[in-house]
Amino acid sequence: MLLAASGCGSVKHGENANLIVGKQQFVAKCGACHTLARAETKGSVGPNLDVAYAPTVSEGLGRSSIRSVVQHQVEYPNPEEVMPRGLASGAVLNDIASYVAASADNPGKDTGLLASAVAPVGSGKAAEEKAGKLELEASPTGQLAYTTNKAVAQAGQVTISMKNMSGVTHNLAIQTGTSGPVLGATPLEPKGTASFTVKLKPGSYTFFCQAPGHRAAGMVGTLTVK
């Protein structure tokens, strides 16, 4: 039986599952499509898991039933939906399903080792332009985020590149302020590095991902040009 952990801070949970691995793998493999508050994922392609499993929790059906449903849905995905077959299996799937079961519709935040299992969105050191080149990176964990949400550059011609090794389709676009016209953008790609060159004046710019729902989910940052 999978018991509800009010703090979700333990390492082992339900059928010898490792919740730390479960959280990391959930973010990497599922977070781009699903919202789960404790994992701080905001994907909107698939169901919001807190909402989807709220009736199960409120009706007292047991979190072990959530784990079983998650395992079955991943093992046998609906062919008419976007979840790929073979997303996870074995111990990894058990870890993911156990983390979702412990976290879905569970108020509060992860504590202990779970709190630091995945780096906070955009928490990396600010990216700095050097010799006319500014390099940014999509989070390799699969989070809908760049590794940093801050960047600085000198005015003039700047080549901006974005590396994406997550396997989730992303790009990087830049606009003046927060709602100005797009000045340049890389292609939408699941993996690889692409770049574009723009001439920037001093001021504040926004860089963001143009994939549907990604900017709203937090894949956005500020570029300060001096």
Image (spheres, rainbow, N blue to C red):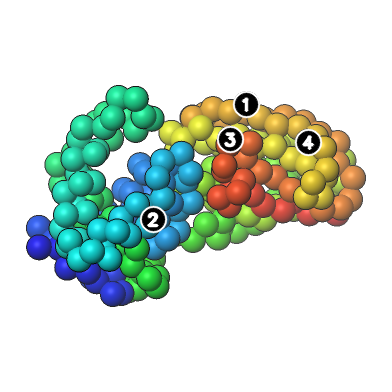
Q: Residue at x 39, y 63 (%)?
A: 38
Q: Residues within 10 Å of mark 1 (few under 14, many from 20)?
A: some
Q: Amino acid at mark 1?
A: Pro
Q: Residue furthest right?
A: 201
Q: Which mark is residue 43?
A: none
Q: Earlier in the sequence, mark 4 or mark 1?
A: 4
User: Would residue 220 appear left or right of 117 to someone viewing this image?
Assistant: right
- The residue beneath circle 3 is 211
- The residue beneath circle 2 is 51
Q: Amino acid at mark 2?
A: Val
Q: Residues within 10 Å of mark 4 (few under 14, many from 20)?
A: few
| Secondary-structure class at tag 3 | loop
Q: Residues within 10 Å of mark 3 (few under 14, many from 20)?
A: some
Q: Residues within 10 Å of mark 2 (few under 14, many from 20)?
A: few
- The residue beneath circle 4 is 182
Number of numbered discs visible in the structure rendering: 4
Q: Amino acid at mark 4?
A: Val
User: Would residue 115 appear left or right of 149 to someone viewing this image?
Assistant: left
Which is closer to the viewer, label 3 or label 2? Answer: 2
Rendering coords of residue 10 (x, y %) = 23, 70
User: Would residue 64 appear left or right of 191 to someone viewing this image?
Assistant: left
Res. 117 image quadrant: bottom left
Give the CA distance from mark 3 to mark 4.
14 Å
Give above or below for 185 relative to 218.
above
Give the CA distance from mark 1 to mark 3.
10 Å
| Secondary-structure class at tag 4 | strand
Q: Which mark is residue 187?
A: 1
Give above or below for 13 relative to 178.
below
Q: Residue at x 24, y 38 (%)?
A: 74
Rendering coords of residue 55 (x, y %) = 29, 59
